[in-house]
Every structure is written in structure tokens, then in C-alpha cells.
Amino acid sequence: MGVSSLAFRAYPARNEKIGKGRMRNSCRIGRRAALSLPFVAAAGAAGAQEAWPSKPVRMMIPYPPGGPTDILGRIAANRLTQDLGQPFVVENRGGAGGSIGAEMIARAAPDGYNFLVNASAHVIVPHMMRVNYDPVRDFAPVTTIASVPLILVVPVSSPARDVQGLIAHLRATPTARSFASSSNGGAPHLAGEMFKLATGIELQHVPYRGSGQALPDVVAGQVGFMIDSMASSADLVRQGRLRALAVTTRERQPAFPDVPTMEQAGLPGFVITTWYGIWAPAQTPGRLVTAMQEATAKALAAPDSTQRLSALGAIAGGESPETYANFTTAENERYARLVREANIRAE
């Protein structure tokens, strides 16, 4: 019993030492764990970021269906839907030169699920009419969808067969002295004002709510002419329902190689193109802006997209948000100066 008693007394002493050692080790492990918690939390937060997109994405087009912004926006939206597995839902909200839809996105949640698809009018309209947003400060530029030439078209019933013939017809026929545009403040509106200045002919501007509404009246001869985006007019020219007299680029366009430039037609310096891009609300996280840009660039490079864009005479975009931001800022300043110097106002 003595031996047994001594043995019994000895084991608790050894266990006590082991217990103290374990406590010290536990403390050291606890301190290490505490020190590592911020890093674990950061890694957890990064890992917990929701995959984008995880629900439908709204793409606001601030014009009615059928115009160039709508056509190009849907090309991008359809391909993005295929590529990313979530619906990119086009919402048309026309009116006030596109400013109604633009303001809705400026005030929308900056969560990566609200985007504006607009033309260069985005940085023109605010210099021609009062709007409740700043086109630069209130938006995060994402990327360009495409740049598209403008094309001067007349009804096939018009006697004009070229630009000089149109000028002669307008001078001789006061009732023909009108031009249509897709909206107040867009590039087609500015192009019409440039034509007025270049020819010295007083012309009546007839703004519509999108090219889709303007072109039927041009086809019917209700207005004298229109300088429209090639994206919306090209098919009507090919169908023989409109006559193309000139393009507004420095070079002739592959889509219509027989149509001269405005400069070749006798109006030197008459060069203007329109571009279409994507914006997010200003506070949208950079990673979501970049994700949308990268997805859009991929969508525009898809064979079906490039084929459709080429048929419209469009040059695909997809550049980085930084490059696009610099471009839109410069365009905003350029159009502010042009509108001021030409004293152009919305109708």
C-alpha cells in the first residue's frame, strides 16, 4: 500500500506540471491567434465579397427604343447577359434630351447594379439646358461602347443628290428649311447647327424623342434632312428609303464607300462623330466599375457583336475606366466651349 500510495501521490505532481505547461502553451497560442485576427478578418471580408453580378443589372437608356443609343446598348446588354448569366435589363426612359434617365442613375444606389448607357449628349445637354446633376462629378465613367459616324440623309423624294444640291434646294425652297434631330443637345443637333453656320441658311430645328421617332418623318419628307447616327440610319439607306449625301468623318466609311465626307462635299472642317458609353453612379466601388468594364470589353469583342457593330459603321470601345474618364472630361470641356461660342440653345 505504501508503494501504491507513493505512486498515487507522484502522478498528480507530474500532471500539475503538464497542466501548467499546457496553460502556458495555450496562452502563447491565444496571443498568436489574437494577433492574427485582423488578418483573418480581412481575408474573410475579401472572401465574403459578393460575386458580381448575383442578380439582374439595370441598364438605363434615356431615350425611346429604336434609336442608336438603344441599338448599341442592347448589343452590349444581350451579350453581357449571355456571358455573365444574369439579365442585363434595358430600361428606356426618354425625355429632356436624355436628362431624365441620366438623373435617375445619378441618384441610384452605387451598388454595381445600376448603369447609364448614353451618347455624347451626356456631356452636351447640361450646357444647353438646366439639369439636376453634373455630367462628370455625379457619375463614374465605365467605358465606351462604340464611336459612330454621323451621316447626312434626305428623303428619297428630295431633289438633292449631293450636299451642294441640298444647299441649293434649301435656298430655293423655304418650306424645306428644317432639319430633324434625335433630341435637344445631342451630336445630331449640334451637327445641324454646324450645317446652318457653314451654309448661312436659317434652318428650323425639329427635335424628336429619339431617332426612332425622327426617321419616319424624314422618310416621309416632313422635314428637309437629318444628320443622324449611322447606327440608326444605315439600314434605311440600304433599303432605299433614305438617300445618304455625306458622312461627317475625315475619311469615307467602309459601310458606305461611295458616300463622300462633308469636307469632300465642299464644307471644310465639318467633322463630328458621336460616341456611346456606360456610366455608373459616382460612388460605385472601383472593383465593380472595373468588373463592368472588363465584361463589356469582352462582350464587344465577341464575333456576333463585332459583326453587328461593323454593319452599323461603329468602332467598338472597351477602354479602361481611367482612359474613358479622361476622354469624357475633355469632351465635356470641348462641348461647353462649342455651345457657348455658337450660342446654341435647346428648343
Image (cartoon, helix red, strand yellow):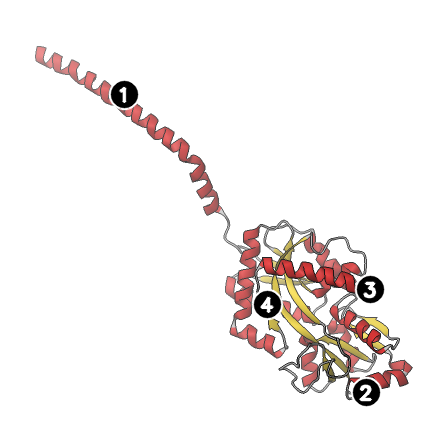
The secondary structure type at the circle numbered 1 is helix
Q: Earlier in the sequence, mark 3 or mark 4?
A: 4
Residue on which disc 3 sits: 341
Q: Does residue 79 lie above or below 140 as drawn?
A: below
Q: Label 4, on which residue?
A: 317
Q: Quadrant of the C terminus?
A: bottom right
Residue 59 in view here: no
Q: Is residue 202 left or right of residue 38?
A: right
The amino acid on which the numbered mark 2 sits, given as a three-letter code, is Gly
Comparing marks 4 and 1, which lies closer to the viewer?
4
Q: Which residue is mark 1?
A: 20
Answer yes or no: is residue 238 visible. Answer: yes
Say which of 23 and 187 sits in front: 187
Which mark is on residue 165?
2
User: On the image, which quarter does residue 223 sit in?
Assistant: bottom right
User: What is the x, y in percent for residue 75?
Assistant: 60, 70
Q: Amino acid at mark 1?
A: Lys
Query: Could you tell me which secondary element the residue under label 3 belongs to?
Result: helix
The image shows residue 277 at horizontal and vertical percentages of: 64, 64
Tell me the distance, in whole angstroms, between the alpha carbons under discs 4 and 1. 68 Å
Tell me the distance, in whole angstroms, between the alpha carbons under discs 1 and 3.
86 Å
Q: CB under 8 Å between callouts 2 and 1?
A: no
Q: Earlier in the sequence, mark 3 or mark 2?
A: 2
